[in-house]
Amino acid sequence: MELTLRHNIRNIYYMFFFQSFMIIIAVFVPLLQRYGLTMSQVLQTQALFALVVAVFEVPSGYLQKVFSTMLFRPMVFWTSLAIIVFSLLGLYAFWVYQKYWELNGIPVAWFGYLWAVHCVLRGLIGQWAHEIEEVLGWQRVFRLSAALPIIALVGMGLFSGWMGIAFTVGLIICRGLSTVVFYDALNKRVDGDFRATVNSLVSLGTRGLFIVTGPVLGYGVDALGVNSTLLILAVFLAPLLTFVLFFLSRHIRDESEQQVMAKAKAEKSLNA
């Protein structure tokens, strides 16, 4: 690898670090609420932000080729859909966390520590994601990815105080694990010429869904309360996660069978 490319890898790590190093994030929701915004209005502002980003997300000239890549390659399509769904789940959790902490009597001064623990744990899980997949197998990783967030949302909805907050660990583990496993699977199956654009399109899908559903989540928190909204979210997401991972699993098996058949055919040709 050329020296310039090695430097680019280092620079990208620096860029991601400083993008994530936004200390104000830990108290962003209480800050906006101090200005009189409801949760519905907070999420409306974030939906507007997502819309602005989405407008410039994907170069329009590549869209036709990228859509063809995704639609005619089922593994790419279902992996992309899995990333979109789990990323959307992560966005929902992020915007509910701070309101949940506040209503459970956690002082705002502690929010930074809680968010730091969240980031460190998610980073560690992401670092070990491939090792976890090798030990458990992709089937168990899929089951964990589907079960952990639902258990977490139900636990947060049913319990209060530190007991409810402890259930957020399930969301953190799911986020760290699913992000690495699914993005790695996607990038391995997309040619380098289209990889960046496909990833941008996946991000666009997440933002597009959040633009529509984010304000609804905020309205639910204001109208029904955080706990009830979390339970409704669990009921909504359980079949969605199951649906996406079921079809992704089926195509993984189909791909594995095709690879085995192709290998056997190649060996037969060599022996002939």
Image (cartoon, rainbow, N blue to C red):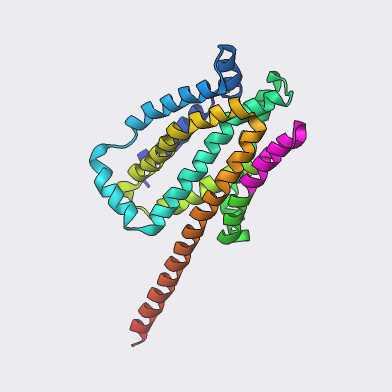
Q: Count every numbered label the image shows and give the total.
A: 0
71 on left or right of 19: left
Please, which residue is most extreme toward the top here?
Answer: 35
- Closer to the camera in the image, 114 or 237: 237
Magenta-drawn stretch contains 149: yes
Magenta-tinted stretch? 148-169
Q: Who's the residue at 67% across and 42% down the image? A: 154
Please, which residue is most extreme toward the bottom here?
Answer: 272
- Closer to the camera in the image, 174 or 225: 225
Measured from the top left, where is residue 168 in percent x and y?
67, 38
In the rendered image of this protein, does residue 197 appear above or below residue 187?
A: above
Q: Who's the residue at 36% across and 41% down the image? A: 201
In the rendered image of this protein, does residue 167 appear above or below residue 192?
A: above
130 on left or right of 100: left
Question: Please, what is the dominant secondary structure of the magenta stretch?
Answer: helix
Q: Dividing the image into 4 quarters, which one contains the C terminus?
A: bottom left
Measured from the top left, where is residue 184 in percent x and y?
47, 51
- Closer to the camera in the image, 212 or 139: 212
Q: Is residue 4 visible?
A: yes
Measured from the top left, where is residue 171 in percent x and y?
62, 41
Magenta-drawn stretch contains 159: yes
Q: Is residue 17 visible?
A: no
In the rendered image of this protein, does residue 232 appear above or below residue 47?
A: below
130 on left or right of 160: left
